[in-house]
Amino acid sequence: MATKNHISTTINGESKEFLCEPRQTLLEVLRDELDLKGVKEGCGTGDCGSCSVMFDKRLACSCLILAVEAEGRTVETVEGMASGETLHPLQRQFLEHAALQCGICTPGFLIAGKALLEKNPDPDEAEIRLALAGNLCRCTGYDKIVRAVQDAAREMRNS
Amino acid sequence: MKTSEREFKVIGTRPVRHDGIDKVTGRALYGADHSLPGMLHGRVLRSPHAHARILSIDTSRAQAMPGVHAVITGDDLPSVPDRTEALGEGTTNANDLSNNLLAKGKVLYDGHALAAVAATSAHLAEEALDKIEVQYEVLPPVMDVRAAVAEGAPLLHETLRTAGVPESKPSNIAKVIEFARGDLDEGFAAASVIVEREFTTAMVHQGYIEPHNALAKVDADGQITLWCSTQGSFDIRSLCAKVLQIPLSRLKVIPAEIGGGFGGKTTVYLEPLAIRMSQISGRPVHMVMSRNEVLRATGPTSGSVIRLKMGANAHGKIVAADALLDYEAGAFPGSPVLMGAVVIFAPYALENFRIVGRDIVVNRPRTAAYRAPGGTNAAFASETLLDELAEKLAIDPIEIRRRNATCEGVQAPWGPRMQKVGYEELLDAAQSHPHYSAELPPPNGPLVYGRGFAGGGWGNAGLQSSAILSVNNDGTATLVTGSPDIGGSRTSCAMIAAEELGLEAADVRPSVADTDTIGYTDVTGGSRVTMATGLAVFEAAQDVKRQLRERAARMWECPEEGIVFEDGDAIRPNGERLSLAAIAGKAGRTGGPVIGRATVNANRANGPSFAGFLVDVEVDTETGKVGILRGTVFQDAGRAIHPAYVEGQMQGGSVQGIGWGLGEEYIYSNEGKLENASLLDYRIPTALDVPLIEAVIIECPNPAHPLGIRGVGEASIVPPPAAIANAVAAATGKRLPVLPLSPPRVHAALQTGD
Amino acid sequence: MPTCLQRPESVCTPDPGTLMGQPRIKGGYTLQDIQYSAPQSVEEAVSLLAAAGSQGRVLAGGTDLLVQLKNGARGIRHIIDIKRVAGMETLQHTADGGMRIGAAVSCARIGEDPVVQSNYPGLREAAMLIGSDQIQNRATLAGNLCNSSPAADTVPALAALNTSCEIQGPEGSRIMALADFARGPGQNQLGEGEILIALEVPGRTGHFADAYQRFIPRNEMDIAVVGVGVALALNSAGECTQARLALGAVGPRVIEATEAATHLLGSTLDEETLEQAAEMARAIAQPISDKRGPAEYRRSLVGTLTRRVVRTAAERARNHEGS
Amino acid sequence: MATLFLTAPMRRHAGGTERLEVVGPTVREALEQAEKRYPGITADLFEGNDLRAGFTIAINDTIVDHPLASLLEPTSEIYIVPAMGGG
């Protein structure tokens, strides 16, 4: 058994400490050690975006980050998007637009959408598609996802 | 009351799905998210060779590793009958299935499972795989149908003979099927124009984002609980029971939330291995595939070679059509060639035709269903060839389809008469849609533009479903079905119950139950859930209503006769009303809980669905790249219960069709190694590769269904590749009888003179 | 000749034991046991790497390395994360208008940098083409270079800019032209214990502009089938006074199309000259056929992209006010 | 008299005939009559006494619930249909 490293980090705004082996990815630790199962694994190679998280305020695939790299960093996952009972506008618009079918890619899309709207509050369709191109959805054909992001952006600009 | 006259309150609205909050907050539990105390992690050793004899497997070093609790090979699975029987969705040969789970004797494709390990961590299990030693005698692989039927081709299965051909020799052709009618010679003699081509389509994968997974727990008394991501928990139960030779009553399958299936999650890969290793170790065993394994070793759908000849008279009426469909089955018999044969001429009323289909084994993974299995390949051939006929006859491409369109009373190529279908209405809608008459951009440097249309029909599946609808004492209801919900179907089922009981959709709480909790229910596949499980829910609601009338009579202390149940109230002939809530609140004093139930075989209520795709493309003539500028999908839904999710099926199917048309393909080396087993190189469309897809729902109620519902899950994938090829032809003048229309292929075609 | 132009998975490595080792028969699972260090200084990083010998690998963004590790690159046992080394995450603009890009600067930061946006739009294009936002936020130019994939997007763009590599090792530091850095697929000039610590992009003069284009089948999330980078300068008469042209994914490493670039000099970058240069670029390409495209198709794309990319750069140079 | 539509393989046993006139009362009896006239014509349809997995029966335009026991009317058209599935 390899020696475990002690990591101090901030996850969804709360200080968290965990032990991990160097070979564990951030995705493994989020899911298996910290029980944040909303972070999904679709490919393990950074090609599908299901495991997207905000890592030090930047969108990243947690399958391509070693958990030990999280020392002193911040991590945000889908579990941190709603505040209490209040959904994030993106979450609400995804529901209103039926922008999910099976739902496995949804957490990744929500995080990627949030990263986009924080940088660009008024994206056009092409900008939305570019920003979401790292997230694969096989069910919806993206139409309703794009519309949900557009409406969430509108809602956020107006609030 | 005829459905067309009925006014609906819930059906046709767009409520938020019941499982929505869990899915946008990350709380929904998918197969990989389940865990149990003491759980082991299982991994699978897979063949690096496409075709090889297994000389030996030595697992002793893996077995000896501390932390390794089970190692199994094909020898650890019981022997099972080597014959095709009713099993799973349709028929299955249990021996083939078992050999696919863990190879015996030979490995038949790159990625074929050979052994599995369960250990205290995934890391350890993988280290143990490295310690298993396998010796192979590598054999020449057979990688496509042309090679497989060639004289002297290596045989995958020395004992396989061709079903449907008397006294056949051992062969790679597992089966020949045929539909035919009329006189081909006479038909072609009457043709003004005849076109003939050979089409080649690539093997493609369903590409669901969630990899396969299974968690099995075997108790000391042999009782088994299995959590997995599946389209059909009852099928998983019967397949596991068959290959492990255990009674159905010993196995409970709990369907986890499922992250996409599209047909690919209708069979077993990991489930029996997890159970077997849990039996051996006495501990729960969890298994999850990597993406590489999903692509290499789960069932994609067939690549194919289709020879097609069609003739039409001067009016554009098809007078003869002759098709030979050769479909890759993968390593074991079972391609969807039959459904290809059904689909290839499904949209047309034909008098003279012949369709021959061959199911051919090759050294590729055992194919599984993929959305309208077999149909997309077939329609690519027929719908592009028909387009060519239209071009040669100078007839509008939608008009030629209109002149040949199937309709009520036409004898379908596969046999029976057609009931009312909406194909003519669909073609009218496409022809009059603004998209069809919109201006295309003029050529711009190397960029040229074109528009194409294609149609396609899909029969859908009926099959069996069960439903239990319980009325709560506050007047709300709970609904239990056995149909795993991939695309919002639990909400459409709840909407049907709500409509019948006069409730809001939110007042019906739907759940998808395990195999102990609900009656037998076939797969979430064949576009059947809203139609078939919806029928069971409809029937269960009628059962509830009968009971509510009876209870109302007891409350009124009057005879039941004359009491009706409408809009959520029981109504006496004198106009007096009792609400559902009022009756439910008194259920304890009128006979106990009100619970409706129904089981159905929905084959008789099934109705086909037709789809059409209209597409504008941009072709870069210097690079061969085809871009999709605009897409409109038309589909007959019979009745759209939740229109947003109907649109979602249509848009999703269309974009899968675009992927199939433009870029997706299994690329094998000459040695039979899959070279693109990742989502980087197996290119499913990204958000940037497609435009918004307008969905136009046609509603021609299915006359066989009390609510008029037709399944909508599949038909939309059938037309897009053909529509794209037609658009590329319109843009460039080149007809490419090959899928995908990848940039190098289009580029090469543009360099040739013809 | 390379047998593989993909993002190097372990099977591409022709040199077992040095970089990645023999592949396991697996794919995309978990990592085998590794040691992890996060040194604070270059010296510490160099000595850790030297001590690890052939088993050591530098971790910057990790977008390639972790994929290789998951694919069973068994030779790698010690990961030296350089992101906490001082200066590695620094993007510095030099007095001559050039840049010094620390080895751990992400592609996203290159893309966001206002000076890069205005002065090196071609480099920005290349950096913003690497994978998705998720990948760009992690991946680095130095990592793209060290990974030594012939299809690396930023390498032709950087080569066109005449970039040099600052390397530090047990024997001290050295500078090397970027175009010489890779030796072949997955192989480069770094010796044992050596770390690429920064890229130096020289300053620009006059009506200067760069451009990068690649061809991929999808519109995102793909590896270049062909990539072409160019940097050029025009005089006030609109004549080309400087030109560098680099081709990606059509040889074992980036190819400098010197003859084609030279042909542009003195011309006004008219269509005829572009066509001739494109033909020269086509001729020098050494493409192979693989899953990403047949050789002849790639060769044809070299011509098409060369024409397009020079046209874009020329347009930029004409519109650029110069400095 | 009901009409039994022969599948392409069945026609080979019946000299190319596309349909046979049969009397019920059930589908099973109709198939037995066909077998009597053209021995071997239904061999592939049966496994023992049952319709083989993979086949079902449609009458006119509807797949029937009880394939062999279904009752025929004089206008009935009987079709032997392969069992169809989906994804």
Image: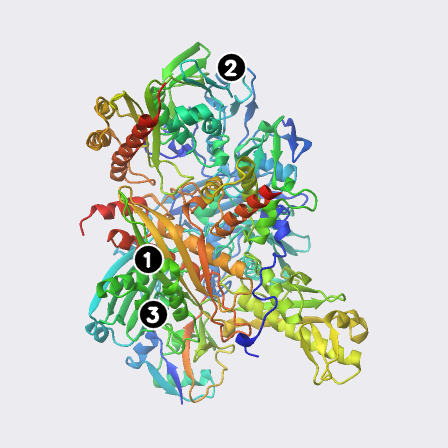
The tag on residue B19 is: none
- The three-letter code of the residue at mark 2 reads Val
Disc 2 marks which residue? C42
- The three-letter code of the residue at mark 3 reads Arg
Would you call the spot at circle 2 few (<14 residues within 10 Å), some (14-19), or many (20 or more)? some
Give the CA separation, mark 3 to mark 1.
Answer: 15 Å
- The three-letter code of the residue at mark 1 reads Gly
Taking the image as shown, residue C280 lies to the left or right of residue C160, namely left
| Image marks 3 and 1: residues in contact by CB distance under 8 Å | no
> Is residue B70 visible in the rendered structure shown here?
no
| Residue C294 x/y as whole percent | 28, 40
| Residue B34 x/y as whole percent | 63, 47
Would you call the spot at circle 3 few (<14 residues within 10 Å), some (14-19), or many (20 or more)? many
Q: At x 43% / y 11%, what residue is drawn? A: C173
Mark 2 belongs to which subunit? C
Disc 3 marks which residue? B402
Taking the image as shown, residue B173 lies to the left or right of residue B602, namely left
> Is residue C52 visible in the rendered structure shown here?
yes
Residue B483's place in the image compared with B57, above or below, is below
The tag on residue B452 is: 1
Mark 3 belongs to which subunit? B
Quarter of the image where one finds residue B723: bottom left
Front label number (1 vs 2): 1
Q: Same subunit under labels 1 and 2?
A: no
**Quadrant placement of the N terminus of chain A:** top right
**Quadrant placement of the C terminus of chain A:** top right
Along the viewing direction, whichever of B503 and A27 lies nearer the viewer: B503
| Residue C133 x/y as whole percent | 48, 35
Along the viewing direction, whichever of A93 and C174 lies nearer the viewer: A93
Mark 1 belongs to which subunit? B
Give the CA separation, mark 2 to mark 3.
Answer: 74 Å
Taking the image as shown, residue D18 lies to the left or right of residue B548, namely left
